[in-house]
Amino acid sequence: MKYLKSLNTGSISASGSKELSWTPDTGIVIKKIMISERSASALNNVQAFISIAAVPYTKDYVPASVIGSNPQYCYMPEAVVDKGAEIYVKLTNSTGSAVNCDVVFEVETA
């Protein structure tokens, strides 16, 4: 079964950051990761760090725009995640105004 899981940052002020985490209650495979900004602001200057089961999937960080928001052109890690393993995301806003981001995972149960 496939489903979508979304984590919202709420408002991240200019120069601020937000940490999000999720611990699935069953084994899953993360098929896709997408990041979007609710007011359609560009994410070129928002940095993303992603760690899945204590394994960094970004080395230091990447611009959130690189992860993508289009299901056809987004990050597709095919990451196997055991029940209880933490999925961790940190977004740092280096823009001049606040952003409100959704980090969306397309998940398949293992």
Image: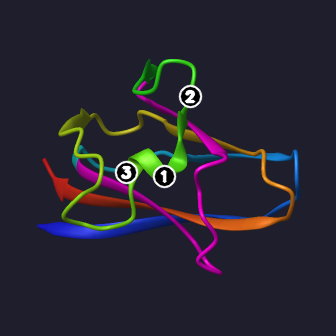
Q: Badge 1: few (under 14), some or many (20 or more) residues near its Cα, within 10 Å?
A: some
Please state which amino acid type lies under the numbered disc 3: Asp
* Labels 2 & 3 near each other (Cβ < 8 A): no
**What SS does tag 1 mark?**
helix
- Residue 61 marker: 2
* Labels 3 & 1 near each other (Cβ < 8 A): no
- State the residue in front, 11 or 94: 94
Q: Which residue is mark 3?
A: 25
The alpha-carbon separation of the residues under discs 2 and 3 comes to 27 Å
In the drawing, does residue 45 fall left or right of residue 53? Answer: right
The magenta segment: 31-53
Please state which amino acid type lies under the numbered disc 1: Ser
Q: Earlier in the sequence, mark 2 or mark 3?
A: 3
Question: Does residue 95 lie above or below 39 as drawn?
Answer: above
- Is-magenta flag for residue 4? no
- State the residue in front, 92 or 90: 92
* Labels 1 & 2 near each other (Cβ < 8 A): no
Q: Can residue 24 be seen in the rendering of this structure?
A: no
* Residue 24 screen position, x and y as percent: 39, 49
Q: Earlier in the sequence, mark 3 or mark 1?
A: 3
Q: Quadrant of residue 78?
A: top left
Please state which amino acid type lies under the numbered disc 2: Tyr
- State the residue in front, 35 or 8: 35
In the drawing, does residue 6 fall left or right of residue 33? Answer: right
